[in-house]
Image: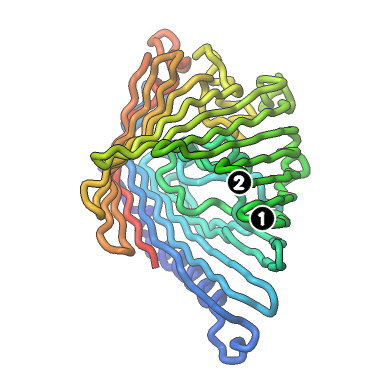
Amino acid sequence: MIDFGSLTKPHYLIKSWIVFFYLLSILVPVDGSCEELFNNIEVSGYVKSLNIIMQPSPLAGIPSGFTTSNQQRVDLTGEVSDFDFEVSAENNLIYSENPLSGFDPFTHESVNRIVKLESTIFTDKYSKDTLDIDRLLIRKNFDNGELTVGRQAIGYGRMSLFSPLDVVEPFSPEALDTDTRPGVDAVRATHYFDLGGQLGGSVILGDGVENNSYLVNFSQNINGFDILGVTGVLRERPMLGGGLATDIGELGLKSEVVFYVGKDVNQEGGDIHSFFVVGGIEAWYRFENGINFIVEYLYNGAGENDPAKYLEVKNSAANNDGLNAFYGQHYLLFGPSYAFTPLVELKVLSFWNILDGSVFARPLLDISVTDDIDVQLFWAMTTGAEPSPATPNMPRSEFGSLGDYGGLYLKYYF
């Protein structure tokens, strides 16, 4: 039986909402004297509730249980003098049947933030309420470019299923929600040229000097080919990456590859390879019956072919930095979808670890109730060799070591 006691304590909820709406009130200038200073003020946001039931994992120590994450976000954009600005606040209330220290899939502690703008309103063994400033930036636009300073979203990759070039604050491959990229503390300058070409540089400030990043990016369209490039130092890790995208008739093709020099190799919490490559090629096609099909081959040089070494990969710096998110090396990723009506769509996400034979598959039914309300029903299934009873903490396959899960995701946008 689920105990909602800690979730419904009145003083916790009241405190959470008071802080959230107080922050909203100070973000939105309503005084008439502000009208001359602020222009084009827009307020938007969302309320989301993600509710998941986990089945027990074959890997020892991961039990079954129910977890809910409830988010409220307010985005404020506008102009002040000759600058654009953006401020976003997000409140997240989590409750779990299991201790959050052992199972908390909804909270990500970013190392790409030099200033702590997150606060915990309350926390106990099974629940937590946090308030986060996810955007806090000012931008100056020029004739052929822009300069942005502050907490902002930075993403380079363009592949749909897993993007090797998404190196700064990447989404998890199985993420249910990729609408809003988490903000990072950075100074970024971009110069635009020709039709869609750009050259940019970013200094991303981490929670320590070792987590600072210094990156240069480039993009251009040449004879129907979109060309991408990123190079620099990513959290003390020299890297060079590139991408290519084009269309051949009805077939869309994308490819990305990144070369890394490992950091703290063979040290605790470091990379396990002194040099590694992460790359993939993705194809997209829409059939006449309305089915959209995406397939990607992924080579993950940060992983290992031997399942006995998966736990070592899990604890490596590359995995903790989000550069691979997989434990093996060779994968096929599938993402078919079909719209039954303009408001109801079935999406399937599947990963196949080619060498150990394990599979992850998650069908999801996306229902647009109105323009502002979205409902998602999903169930994730896994197959593969389970850990041996003699060694319950040692995986024999990647996805065979995971438990199935499913749930309901409710979204309201305003």
> How far across and down, in percent of the image, does residue 394 sit?
47, 15
The image quarter containing residue 208 is: top right
Residue type at mark 1 is Asp
Residue at coordinates 63% horizontally, 41% vertically from top-left? 228
Residue at coordinates 39% horizontally, 55% vertically from top-left? 70
Pick the quarter of the image with the N terminus: top left
Q: Secondary structure at mark 1?
A: loop
- On residue 194, the disc is 1
Q: Are marks 2 and 1 in contact (CB under 8 Å)?
A: yes
> How far across and down, in percent of the image, does residue 3 sit?
31, 47
Q: Is residue 316 above or below residue 248?
A: above
Give the left or right position of residue 368, taking residue 178 as reference: left
Residue at coordinates 24% horizontally, 50% vertically from top-left? 344
Label 2 sits on residue? 221
Q: Residues within 10 Å of mark 2 (few under 14, many from 20)?
A: some
Sequence-wise first label, 2 or 1: 1
Residue type at mark 2 is Asn
Residue 405 visible in this rendered orientation of the protein: no
- Report the residue that reaches farthest toward the left: 340
Give the left or right position of residue 51, taking residue 190 as reference: left
Residue 407 visible in this rendered orientation of the protein: yes
The image quarter containing residue 398 is: top left
Pick the quarter of the image with the C terminus: bottom left
Q: Residues within 10 Å of mark 1 (few under 14, many from 20)?
A: few
> How far across and down, in percent of the image, does residue 116 sit?
66, 56
Give the left or right position of residue 201, taking residue 256 as reference: right
Residue at coordinates 51% horizontally, 39% vertically from top-left? 246
- Report the residue that reaches farthest toward the top: 390
Q: Secondary structure at mark 2?
A: strand
Give the left or right position of residue 266, taking residue 280 as reference: right
> How far across and down, in percent of the image, does residue 109 sit?
58, 45
